[in-house]
């Protein structure tokens, strides 16, 4: 694990959602580290020494069975923190935390984060809300693994990674997908060929390129939309505490166009019943943007 001092702590959405005074309590104790694809942060039973707030890296929590088989039970990206909520008492990891996409993360000592959380109500509240979202994700993932076919689950997993990666080219091999889904590599090969024939993805060396996101969403099981809504509720709940801080990866809709942007100076108004959010922000790429979000 190497240090990457040029990255920004607040690329992580949880850290970005903190008020400056609260973030100032954490910042002196945060260090930015580089995470490499395939790197194992913790094995099942390891004592958790650090919590990680990913930036552009992605980490899976997988359950390793006695026969060596694996299945993913949790996914962590820029929306959250890993190594904290599953180790509050015993400090032991539930399963294997493995990096599935290289990138950076902000790391902090588990003990130090616990001390600051105890003294900072806003941080404690934010972590509790994230814990609720993570529990909802795990609940839906377990149900998905039990009842849905491999093709729908594969589409759900590709879309989940695509949302967090903010790019169309994903470093997903058939072997890695099989391990995450708990199926044979041959089953993944059949599914990806079917998706490529349908024009939804393009297989490339060492990965997959998303061609038709809308088509993948139609093919995926209901779990993808449910998990996305869980995190959207967390995100907009966090946005109300942001004021004019930098906000990243805002999903926006104007007419029929859906996209993402990086923004600052965000303003929003909550409509009737809190269901519709009208937002404006300054985008370095496209200037002033306006749009709305409806949950």
Image (tube, rainbow, N blue to C red):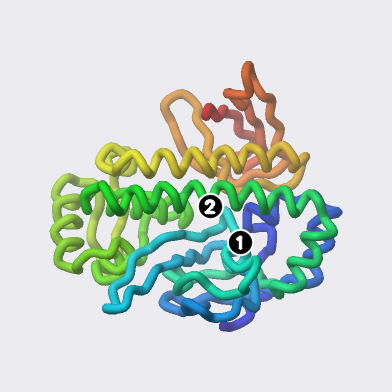
- Mark 1 is surrounded, within 10 Å at the Cα level, by few (under 14), some (14 to 19) or many (20 or more) other residues, namely some
173 vs 92, left or right, is left
Tag 1 secondary structure: helix
- Distance, label 2 to label 1, CA atoms, is 9 Å
From the image, tell me which residue sits under label 2. Answer: 134
From the image, tell me which residue sits under label 1. Answer: 85
Where residue 30 sits, quadrant-wise, is: bottom right
Q: Contact, CB < 8 Å: mark 2 with mark 1?
A: yes
258 and 113: which one is in front? 113
Rendering coords of residue 119 (x, y %): 85, 59
Rendering coords of residue 183 (x, y %): 23, 64
Q: Residue at x 54, y 40 (%)?
A: 232
Q: Residue at x 64, y 47 (%)?
A: 129
Q: Which residue is drawn at 42% across and 26% down?
A: 256
238 and 42: which one is in front? 42
15 and 256: which one is in front? 15
Q: Which mark is residue 288?
A: none
Name the image quarter holding the N terminus: bottom right
Q: Which residue is drawn at 54% across and 81% down?
A: 46
């Amino acid at each position: 694990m190497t240090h990457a001092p040029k990255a920004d702590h607040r690329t992580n959405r949880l850290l970005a959602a903190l008020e400056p005074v609260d973030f100032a309590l954490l910042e002196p104790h945060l260090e930015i580290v580089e995470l490499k694809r395939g790197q194992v942060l913790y094995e099942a039973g390891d004592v958790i020494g650090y919590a990680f707030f990913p930036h552009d890296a992605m980490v899976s929590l997988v359950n390793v069975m006695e026969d060596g088989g694996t299945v993913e039970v949790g996914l962590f990206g820029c929306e959250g923190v890993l190594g904290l909520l599953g180790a509050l008492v015993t400090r032991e990891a539930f399963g294997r935390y493995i990096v599935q996409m290289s990138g950076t993360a902000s790391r902090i000592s588990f003990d130090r984060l616990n001390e600051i959380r105890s003294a900072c109500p806003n941080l404690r509240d934010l972590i509790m809300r994230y814990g609720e979202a993570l529990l909802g994700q795990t609940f839906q993932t377990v149900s998905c693994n039990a009842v849905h076919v491999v093709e729908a689950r594969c589409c759900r997993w590709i879309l989940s990674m695509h949302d967090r990666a903010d790019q169309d080219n994903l470093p997903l091999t058939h072997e890695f997908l099989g391990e995450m889904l708990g199926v044979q590599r041959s089953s993944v090969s059949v599914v990806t060929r079917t998706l490529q024939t349908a024009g939804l993805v393009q297989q490339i060396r060492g990965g997959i390129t998303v061609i038709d996101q809308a088509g993948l969403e139609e093919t995926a099981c209901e779990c993808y939309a449910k998990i996305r809504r869980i995190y959207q509720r967390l995100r907009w709940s966090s946005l109300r505490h942001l004021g004019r801080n930098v906000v990243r990866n805002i999903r926006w809709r104007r007419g029929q166009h859906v996209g993402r942007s990086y923004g600052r100076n965000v303003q929003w108004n909550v409509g009737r019943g809190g269901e519709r959010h009208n937002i404006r922000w300054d985008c370095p790429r496209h200037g002033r943007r306006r749009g709305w979000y409806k949950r």
